[in-house]
Amino acid sequence: MSINGKRKKILDKAGIIAIGVCMAILCVSFLIPIYWLLSTSLKDGQLAYYRNPFGLPKTFRFKNYLEMGQAIFVEGVDSNGRIYVHLVGSLLTNSLIYAVAMPAWSLFLTLCCAYTLSKYKFKGRNFIYNLGIFVFLMPLNTYFPAMMLIHRTLGIWNNMFLHILTSPSAAFSGVTFLAFYAAFRAIPWTYAEAVFMDGGGHFTVFVRIMLPLIVPVFIAWYILGFLGSWNEVNAFLVWLPGFPNLALGMMYFQTIAWQYGASYPKIMAGMLVVMLPAILLFMLTQKLTFTKMNVGGLKE
């Protein structure tokens, strides 16, 4: 091997090692906030946190999570002027219903719309596509008063089921629609023709051929949708005031924590509880998302 060849090989190895070191440092930097959050949530009071803000707690106080759960609540007023209180169980239930159902319904409608526009030619297809892009690009503040009037008139306001069912981004979820549209466009129509030759119909093509090929895309966007819905606050403040979620309860708790003498460990315990479902969902689905990649009709 020539001197230039050896030098090039050494430089290639050095580059790989440098990239590996940079990636390791980046991964550690992502883990540091999680470590700080977990260690702080287990410390025994505010004084223990000030004495050792970044180290492990001397005594692990799991009672912080129980006390945090008892302190989080959201007050509301019904139509008769009576004050009622949503506790952690109610907040958690609302969060789960909204975070599971909202992205599932929205992605399903977006998927059906993207498949129809990408695989079938009919009059008005380009108009519907351009209309969806126009609605996606329009700022929400421009038609907020009209949306509020329509929601109140039709009884959608403060109704979780109807709010999810009539979500303004249900069929055109912005970038999600474009991702599904591109994914379907990349799948050859020859698969559908093979199904037609075997006696199958359009529904069989959609369910048995097209959907399995974009499972990783669907799961990836569902995880992102779940994270956004789980941490949603504005929708519950504006559209669903009678169904507060856990993120809203945590926001109120953090705002008035000083009134109850809540320490940083208790606040961090609450934040960790809010983050936990999203972390678990990602851990359970990352293998399916990152390993089941499809190229054409072949799985790698």
Image (cartoon, rainbow, N blue to C red):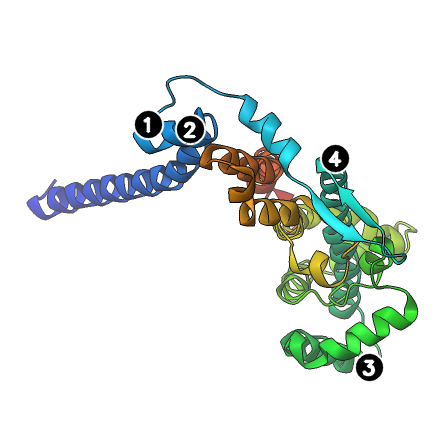
Residue bearing mark 3: 124
The amino acid beneath tag 1 is: Gly
Mark 4: which amino acid? Gly
Residue 22 vertical placement versus 265 (above, below)? below
Q: Are marks 3 and 2 in contact (CB under 8 Å)?
A: no
* Residue, far top: 59
Label 1: how many Cα within 10 Å (few below 14, some 14–19, many 20+): few
Tell me which corner region of the image, top left, top right, bottom left or bottom right, holds residue 157.
bottom right
The answer to whether the residues at label 3 and label 4 have Cβ atoms under 8 Å apart is: no
**Residue 39, labelled with which disc?**
2
Q: Is residue 230 above or below residue 291?
A: below
Earlier-in-chain disc, 2 versus 1? 2
Where is residue 101 shown, x and y percent of the image? 78, 48
Residue at image x 73%, y 48%?
Answer: 75
Q: Work out how far the residue at label 3 is from the one at label 2, CA to CA, in angstroms.
A: 58 Å
Q: Residue at x 73, y 38 (%)?
A: 87
Q: Name the amino acid, label 3.
A: Gly
Left or right side of 116 for 298 = left
> Could you tell me which quadrant the N terminus lies in?
top left
Do the numbered discs 2 and 1 sit on residues whose CB atoms are within 8 Å? yes
Where does label 4 land, which residue? 89
Residue at numbered disc 1: 55
| Sequence order check, earlier mark of 3 and 1 | 1
Secondary structure of the residue carrying numbered label 3: loop
- Identify the disc placed on residue 264: none
- Foreground residue, 285 or 59? 59
Q: Residues within 10 Å of mark 2 (few under 14, many from 20)?
A: many
Q: CA distance from mark 2 to mark 4?
A: 25 Å
Q: Secondary structure at mark 2?
A: helix
Quadrant of residue 79 within the rendered picture: bottom right
Which amino acid lies under the numbered mark 2 shown in the image of this protein? Ser
